[in-house]
């Protein structure tokens, strides 16, 4: 029997889906991922519940396949993940076409249930195991590496701790073993992810062990690139900067969500950091790791955000010139501190206008940043070919979310291989270049 798994939301969800796929395949099912036209008897949707837009996307996808089931195009429909776990009772009432809903951490139970239900139709080539690896759905040369689950930070606006629970680090031994296994499968690039990267190890050894972990991963033979995602600025482990600077296979890249810069907003958001501390941290990162690519996420329209607060955020963005930046408008999330204690008093049209203005500013900054690479030679990895271009990335770009390097070549370039490329042009989104010897 064939199962099509559809993953919505973040790369952490993708890792969960890949783990479930491997388990289902060991049991005896055939699995596909994010098929454009699912033809499997069974569909599993892994949902996201982070913000309103993500919740709406997940619900629309569930309804789409509920209709497919009603029309007989699929036989069974299961839903798992963050949205499913958080709103299970409501979803069960509103969408009865779904055979069963599961929480974020219940995918092993889902595998067991499917095995029991379809035991006569699958081969049971394997058996249920607690740890069985992953079916990598990304291009074979890169993978996401989840090092922990949950978050202890409790920012005012964020529902992640509600959905994922307290921070739980995986052991260094388990992580390194997974890296070695993936390297043996051909993975060269590891994008290290967590809800809160810098907290890693506190629940194991009583202190931050992220620098030690990254050193251990970088020591594995065959690891070419390591890129770090979702750091938190408060109590940032400064020894991690030394590792980034000293280790050639650790990309000079840091994804650190700052959300805002106004002290008024930072306090109301419960970020436990000040504007000056933030500026000091950015300066230290750029001093300790010359040329580091900084990616951040900012929020507009948080309750109580004034024009002065927003203008301060604009000035900050203009001054710091982040290499990469994403932004979103505040949406009230049930059960969070801000939902319980603040009034969502910034009108939606004001939120959208501020978001548009901030992103327009970042677009001009991105164009300036990209132009600084013209004339330089970058080491890139080839992701795919589209039309006349080979689509590549440098160490400064994470898959799917960051600008790419578009390369024309008379010779065929191999996907998953590294090349040196001289940058000959740029725009606000991408770089252009030619392979050099």
Image: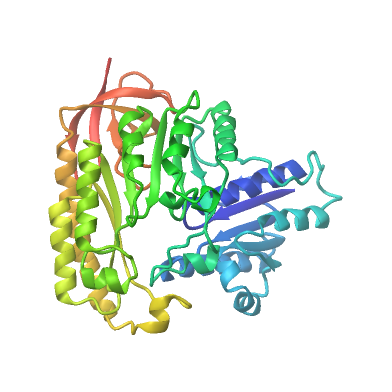
Q: Nearer the viewer, residue 316 or 198?
A: 198
Residue at 56 percent across and 30 percent down: it is: 180
Name the residue: 44% across, 48% down: 208
Up-down relation of residue 239 to residue 202 (above or below): above
Quick check: 78 above or below 324? below
Counting every numbered tag in the picture gives: 0
Q: Quarter holding the C terminus?
A: top left
Q: Position of residue 146 (x, y in %)?
A: 51, 46
Residue that lies at the very extreme toward the top in this rendered image: 437
Asked whether residue 34 appears in the rendered view, the answer is no
The residue at 54%/29% (across/down) is 183
Horizontal and vertical percent for residue 386?
A: 37, 36
Quarter of the image holding residue 309? Answer: bottom left
Given residues 331 and 54, the one toward you in this image is 331
Question: Which residue is at 42% across, 27% downward?
Answer: 224
Q: Is residue 434 left or right of residue 158?
A: left
Near-viewer residue (108 or 48): 108
Res. 343 in view:
yes
């Amino acid at each position: 029997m064939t199962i099509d798994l559809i993953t919505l939301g973040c790369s952490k969800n993708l890792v969960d889906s890949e783990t479930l796929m491997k388990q289902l395949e060991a049991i005896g099912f055939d699995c596909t991922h994010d098929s454009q036209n699912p033809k499997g008897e069974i569909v599993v949707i892994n949902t996201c519940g982070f913000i309103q837009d993500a919740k709406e996307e997940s619900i629309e996808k569930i309804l789409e396949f509920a209709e497919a089931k009603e029309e007989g195009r699929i036989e069974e429909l299961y839903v798992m993940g963050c949205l499913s776990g958080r709103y299970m009772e409501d979803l069960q009432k509103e969408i009865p076409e779904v055979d069963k809903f599961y929480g974020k951490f219940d995918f092993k139970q889902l595998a067991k249930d499917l095995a029991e239900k379809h035991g006569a139709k699958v081969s049971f080539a394997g058996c249920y195991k607690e740890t069985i690896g992953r079916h990598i759905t990304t291009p074979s040369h890169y993978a996401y590496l989840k090092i922990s689950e949950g978050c202890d930070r409790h920012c005012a606006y964020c529902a992640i701790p509600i959905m994922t629970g307290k921070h739980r680090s995986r052991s260094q031994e388990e992580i390194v073993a997974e890296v070695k296994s993936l390297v043996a499968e051909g993975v060269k690039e590891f994008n290290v992810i967590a809800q809160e990267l810098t907290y890693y190890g506190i629940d194991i050894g009583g202190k931050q062990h992220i620098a030690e972990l990254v050193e251990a991963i970088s020591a594995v033979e065959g690891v070419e690139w390591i890129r770090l995602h979702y750091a938190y600025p408060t109590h940032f482990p400064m020894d991690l900067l030394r590792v980034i600077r000293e280790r050639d296979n650790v990309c000079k890249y840091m994804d650190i969500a700052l959300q805002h810069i106004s002290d008024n907003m930072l306090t109301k958001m419960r970020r436990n950091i000040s504007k000056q501390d933030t500026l000091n941290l950015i300066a230290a990162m750029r001093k300790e790791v010359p040329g580091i690519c900084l990616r951040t996420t900012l929020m507009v329209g948080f309750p109580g955000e004034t024009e002065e607060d927003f203008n301060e955020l604009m000035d900050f963005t203009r001054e710091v010139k982040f290499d990469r930046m994403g932004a979103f408008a505040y949406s009230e999330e049930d059960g969070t501190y801000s939902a319980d204690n603040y009034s969502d008093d910034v009108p939606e049209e004001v939120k959208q206008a501020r978001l548009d203005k901030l992103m327009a500013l970042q677009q001009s900054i991105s164009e300036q940043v990209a132009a600084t690479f013209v004339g330089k030679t970058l080491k890139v990895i080839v992701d795919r070919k589209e039309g006349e271009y080979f689509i590549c990335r440098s160490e400064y770009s994470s898959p799917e979310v960051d600008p790419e390097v578009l390369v024309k070549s008379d010779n065929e370039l191999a996907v998953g291989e590294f090349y040196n490329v001289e940058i000959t042009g740029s725009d606000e989104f991408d770089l252009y270049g030619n392979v050099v010897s």
